[in-house]
Amino acid sequence: MTPSEPLPGNPFHHVRVYPPEEVTRRSEAECDPAEAGLTRADVEAIWDAVIRFYRTGLQPSIALCLRRRGKVVLDRTVGHLVGNEPDLPADAPKLVASPDTLYSLMSASKSITSMLIHLCNERNLLRVDDAVVDYIPEFGRHGKHWITIRHVLTHTAGIPVLPDVELDLDILADPDRILRLLCDAKPLTPPGRRLAYHALTGGYILAELIRRVAGVEVKEFLEREVLRPLGFRNLSFGVSPADFPRTAKNVCTGLRPIFPVSWLLRRALGAGLEETVRLSNDPRFLTAVVPSGNIHCTANEASRFFQLLLGGGQLDGVRVFERPTVRRAIGEQSHFNFDFTMWLPLGYGMGFMLGHEWASLFGPGAPRAFGHIGFTNLLVWADPERDIAVALLNNGKPMINPDLIWWLNVSRVIAARCPREVPV
């Protein structure tokens, strides 16, 4: 069997699809499915759904880690972390991805950054209903003194973008400059009035709040308060140069976005698709701290973080968050409201996207699921009713493409093969 060729006539093309058995790697951490209340057929059906998504040619590589009842039942990758870009020749050097491969969570980083704010709330360093200006006085210009921390966490602060600012690495990697721009910005809508996803802006505000109340930068706060106590080794804001060789390279795939999708993307991120992907692979971005968008990790450790939340803030006998803190973070703040940035109806908690009974990123019948999407089709989530914590990571960046139905199919199959248990 030979790899399939990119489809002709597509502006971005698809990547070559290799025989899955040649480019699949699995972790020794996988347990006997029976220990998690599943069968071998269940596990293979879920992995078959991943392979079906891989066969679309939209993803150079895909990583899936699924925990059920706290047990790792799937921790596998398929494809290449580098070398299988549409514009490279078939014989270009390639590296097969493995469970040790690092992926950028992109916007799914928000769920982790938000939990650091909730930890500050738990420790009485701030309150989520305090005004941002209580801690960052200069932020109150142009009527922004009414914006609360809750507004930022729920994407209702009215500053989803920095108007007329073309984002580049000189700006993204300079939090002080971003903060000055945010302080000078005029809100587009009154706080609390309209739901509009804050793709980048909110994270910088949250990181500055942490710096002012905890006295350390957000990266150090995450490492000191969460990662080191729990023994995380492969999750952090950015990556060190030594880890570049095992970091998946992001790739434009599928159809080139056209208006209005191209306009929505530029409005949300301050850059077009190709420019955003190029920036995401730049060493300056890889080593920077972008609170809303550049936590890098393995699928296993992304899943493990959501297992921590599924356990009410405790993991492997170590408590990091109090149970009410987690409950507050994932509690519903907006119920399937229309998001004027994403142009979709979405439910939000304070830092999380929420599931739904019949229309959900996390599969059908998932009203208590919580998690986050990442640019463009990364997905991390937990579902208490199914007792699962999942990370579905990849490095292809398609926007609108008919084959993305096979991405949604992965969460659908997981929901079907992991039936609801007694609610906890």
Image (spheres, rainbow, N blue to C red):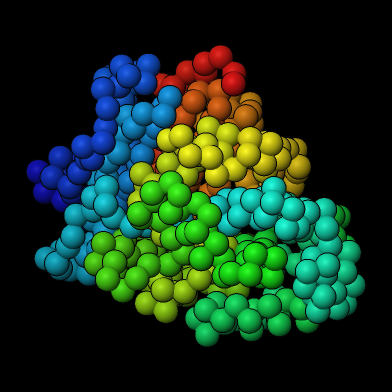
Which residue is outermost to the top? 422
Q: Give the image location of residue 370, x and y in percent.
A: 59, 38
Q: Kindly identify the residue that appears in the image at 74 percent across and 47 percent down.
A: 338
Q: Quadrant of residue 116?
A: bottom right
- Quarter the C terminus occupies: top right
Screen quadrant of the N terminus: top left
**Rendering coords of residue 179 (x, y %):** 68, 78
What count of labels does the image hold?
Answer: 0
Does residue 169 appear left or right of residue 68 in this picture? right
Nearer to us in this view, 51 or 134: 134
Q: Is residue 350 above or below residue 71?
A: below
**Residue occupying image coordinates x 43% and y 46%:** 230
Viewer-side residue, 232 vs 257: 232
Q: Is residue 102 left or right of residue 118?
A: left
Q: Quadrant of residue 313?
A: top right
> Residue 191 location, x and y as percent?
85, 60
Q: Residue at x 41, y 73 (%)?
A: 287
- Examine the rendered structure and indicate whether residue 390 appears above or below residue 36: below
Q: Tell me if I can see residue 351 in this picture.
A: yes
Q: Position of residue 34 (x, y in %)?
A: 31, 16
The structure residue drawn at horizontal position 64% and vertical position 51%, both measured from the top left corner, is: 119
Q: Nearer the viewer, residue 343 or 214?
A: 214
